[in-house]
């Protein structure tokens, strides 16, 4: 088992466990590796070297930098906001654009909804005067038991 240090383009660091280097590359190529915090699939491997204890001498151990308190605070606020939105809205999935229009035009009861919409659908909704906000939700947070 290989434990790799990974980082997404938003600077979130995390570990990934893979059977081999080829397994890591294969999963990346298939889009299966994503940041557990923001869901970004643009992930890179951080440089690391295996440490072998072949002699009693101790070298300098390099430790990856920990997130700053500010980063931790922002991440915690973001996670709380995502949890709040998920708790207060109904997931309508792929029907998001249609359901948003029905609510906007008074065809169904007004309520908070969330779901998926293409960039074109989102633009069309905005042109119709329907307020839409993108909120990336990591797959790890969708349908969790917590």
Image: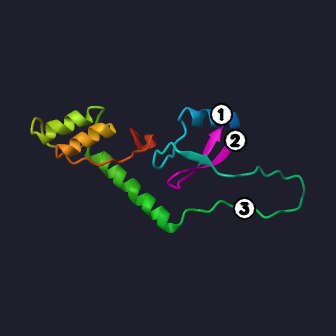
19 sits left or right of 126 in the view: right
Q: Image quarter for residue 81?
A: bottom left
Dot 1: element: helix
* Residue visible at 20% across and 44% down in the picture: 127
95 sits left or right of 129 in the view: right
Q: Do the residues labelled 1 and 2 touch (CB within 8 Å)?
A: yes
Query: For the residue carrying disc 1, how many other residues have a C-alpha within 10 Å: few (<14), some (14-19), or many (20+)?
Result: few
Between 71 and 80, the residue placed more toward the observer is 71
Q: Does the magenta stretch include residue 14?
A: yes
Magenta region, residue range: 1-19
* Image mark count: 3
Q: In this view, does 117 lie above or below 62?
A: above
- Which residue position is annotated with label 2? 2
The mark nearer the N terminus, 3 or 1, is 1
Q: Are marks 2 and 3 in contact (CB under 8 Å)?
A: no
Q: Is residue 43 above or below residue 92?
A: below
């Amino acid at each position: 088992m290989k434990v790799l240090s990974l980082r997404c383009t938003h600077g979130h660091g995390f570990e990934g466990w893979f059977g081999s280097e080829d397994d890591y590359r294969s999963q990346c190529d298939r889009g299966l590796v994503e940041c557990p915090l923001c869901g970004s699939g643009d992930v890179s491997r951080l440089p690391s070297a295996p440490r072998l204890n072949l002699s009693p001498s101790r070298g300098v151990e390099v430790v990856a930098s920990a997130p700053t308190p500010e980063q931790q605070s922002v991440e915690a606020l973001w996670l709380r906001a995502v949890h709040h939105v998920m708790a207060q809205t109904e997931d309508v999935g792929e029907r998001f654009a249609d359901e948003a229009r029905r609510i906007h035009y008074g065809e169904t009861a007004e309520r908070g909804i969330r779901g998926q919409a293409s960039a074109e659908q989102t633009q069309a909704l905005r042109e119709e005067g329907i307020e839409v906000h993108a909120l990336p939700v990591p797959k790890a947070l969708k349908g969790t038991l917590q």
